[in-house]
Image: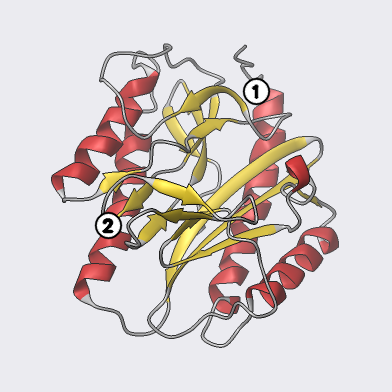
Amino acid sequence: MIDLKSKDELKVIGDGCRLLSELFQELGQWVKEGVSTFDLDRETENWIVKHKAKPAFKGYRGYPASLCVSINDEVVHGIPNRNKKVTAGDIVGVDCGLIHNGFYADMAFTYIIGEVSDEIRRLVDSTRESLYRGIEKARTGNRLFDISHTIQAYVEERGYSVVREFVGHGIGRQLHEDPQVPNYGQAGKGVPLTEGLVLAIEPMVNAGGSEVRVEPDGWTVRTKDGSLSAHFEHTVAITSNGPEILTQVPR
């Protein structure tokens, strides 16, 4: 069942999303060569608690950390580890959520560490651009798969694949609400997009094939062919004035 948010609820969600976007500005400084993903997780959790919010991921269906850190061929849900360190040339996908005043906020960003090839930069840039093109379709009068199709078409035109096993989602009082937001689909299909709907839109894009596998830890998702993967996500509200990116980082 889709839970449309009132204007008062959107304001509360927006406050939490702004807090999360502030955290990602800090993460932009913390994610660097030599840092362990364990230390990133500790710093993140401390920051969230200090700002009177709660980590959304820790304990969710048994997930053991406050942050997901997925490096290179890891797609999503990489578990932080003391021995897992960021190195030059990596691309590092960071996914984080928090709970603020009873509502969830969710966001992901892929960082480039040091010098990388033009091919790697193109993958990351294309994934980010696919997100913004999808968000542009998050308007009343459109349908859900207008978002999905736009992301898929843009990604595949560039020779990449969208991950199909994992999707975006509605968000609000729960981390995962209806509807699911796949990164593929037929334009003009899916539920109508309505004012008050809040979506976490999150393209996961592989440089190679779309297939993925889950590591024995039960969480970490990798590309099946070992190709690189990138991930971006924003929490977006559909309003009468168009899509509002609630987790937008201030410029």
Quadrant occupied by the N terminus = top right
Work out whether mark 1 precedes mark 2 in sequence or the reverse, and give the earlier one.
1
Q: Secondary structure at mark 1?
A: helix
Q: Residue at 48% x, 58% y: name it.
A: 109
Q: Quadrant of residue 153?
A: top left
Q: Quadrant of residue 95?
A: bottom right
Position of 75 compared to 121: left or right?
Answer: right
Q: Quick check: can you spot residue 28?
A: yes
177, above or below 167, in the image: above
Q: Quadrant of residue 144?
A: top left
Amino acid type, mark 1: Lys
Q: CA distance from mark 1 to mark 2?
A: 40 Å
Residue 41 or residue 82, whichever sits in front: 82
User: Residue 64 at x, y = what percent?
Assistant: 76, 56
Q: Quick check: can you spot residue 251?
A: no
Q: Which mark is residue 7?
A: 1
User: Residue 174 at x, y = what percent?
Assistant: 71, 30
Q: Residue at 51% x, 17% y: name it.
A: 195
Q: How many marks?
A: 2
Q: Secondary structure at mark 2?
A: loop
Return the residue at label 2: 207
User: Residue 192 at x, y = what percent?
Assistant: 42, 11
The answer to whether mark 1 and mark 2 are in CB contact below 8 A is no
